[in-house]
Image (cartoon, rainbow, N blue to C red):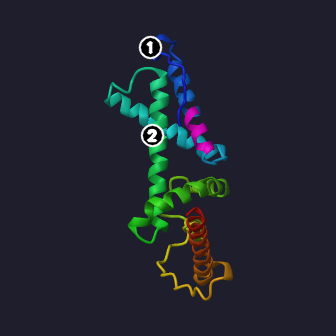
Amino acid sequence: MHLDLPAEDVRQRPADTDFRVQAHAERVVAEYLSRWGLRDPVPIAVQSRLWVRQVLDASRDHPVLAGSANDLRRAALVQAIRAIDHWLDQLALLVAADAAEVEGRRGLLAMELPKLLEECPQVLLQAESLPAALVQQLQRAARPVVPAARRRRMPAQPLGELPPPLQPRRWRHFFGGLATAFLNILWLRRGSGS
């Protein structure tokens, strides 16, 4: 997902800038969560605030992250994307029969995720303590769309008798008669020419 956000330097704004910049970053993350189907404003606000705070805490340790408001919004959005990706991986591991199926199931679960979050917003980022009904719903959603291919040999096709126009005997007779007529014409021309 690409967001064009205006670049603004946090250091050039008044003292309440930190609150406004944080609030804007939270709104960007909230928009991302709502695109996944989460509609309940309480989990959206709690999770958005948590991710922005995590980015702010990390920016104190890493000055590279501290900078413009645009950097904060981007870093918070990256934090949200990584968390959702990790959650999808956990859900795929939960419903896949083996590790080889995880990647294919992940996409199917991603399509089911908006419906799941609309029905049960409290399961956001949970994989261990999901209700059994939701796990069954995820397993149904993660079933392969295309059935597994089984190798089968094609049985020999009985050709039977060819239709009359395609029987070689008729064509031999036709071309034999054509050749005989051509030779007779040549023979007659030679005979009449001498």
Residue 79: image tag: 2
Q: Quadrant of the C terminus?
A: bottom right
Which region shows up in magenta? 28-35
Q: Residue at x 55, y 53 (%)?
A: 124
Residue 151 vertical position relative to residue 78 in the rendered view, above or below: below
Please say if the residues under marks 2 and 1 sit with CB atoms less than 8 Å apart: no
Three-letter code for the amino acid on which mark 1 is drawn: Arg
Q: Secondary structure at mark 1?
A: helix
Q: Earlier in the sequence, mark 2 or mark 1?
A: 1
- Where disc 2 sits, the SS reads helix
Q: Is residue 44 above or below residue 8?
A: below
Residue plotted at (49% across, 77% down): 150
Q: Which mark is residue 37?
A: none
Whether residue 52 is visible to the viewer of this picture, yes or no, is: no
Residue type pointed to by label 2: Gln
Q: Residue at 50% across / 29% down in the picture?
A: 73
Would you say the magenta stretch is mainly helix, strand or loop?
helix
**Residue 12, position in %: x, y?**
47, 11
Q: How far from the left and from the top, in percent, is residue 139? A: 55, 69
Toward the viewer: 83 or 158? 158
Q: Is residue 76 magenta?
A: no
Real-space Cα distance between discs 2 and 1? 23 Å
In this rendering, the label closer to the viewer, 2 or 1: 2
Examine the image and state in which quarter residue 58 appears: top left
Residue wearing tag 1? 11
On the question of residue 59 being in view, the answer is yes
Of residue 133 and residue 16, the one placed in the foreground of this image is: 133
In the rendered view, tell whether residue 24 sits above or below residue 101.
above
Q: Residue furthest front?
A: 194
Residue 185, image x, y percentages:
61, 68
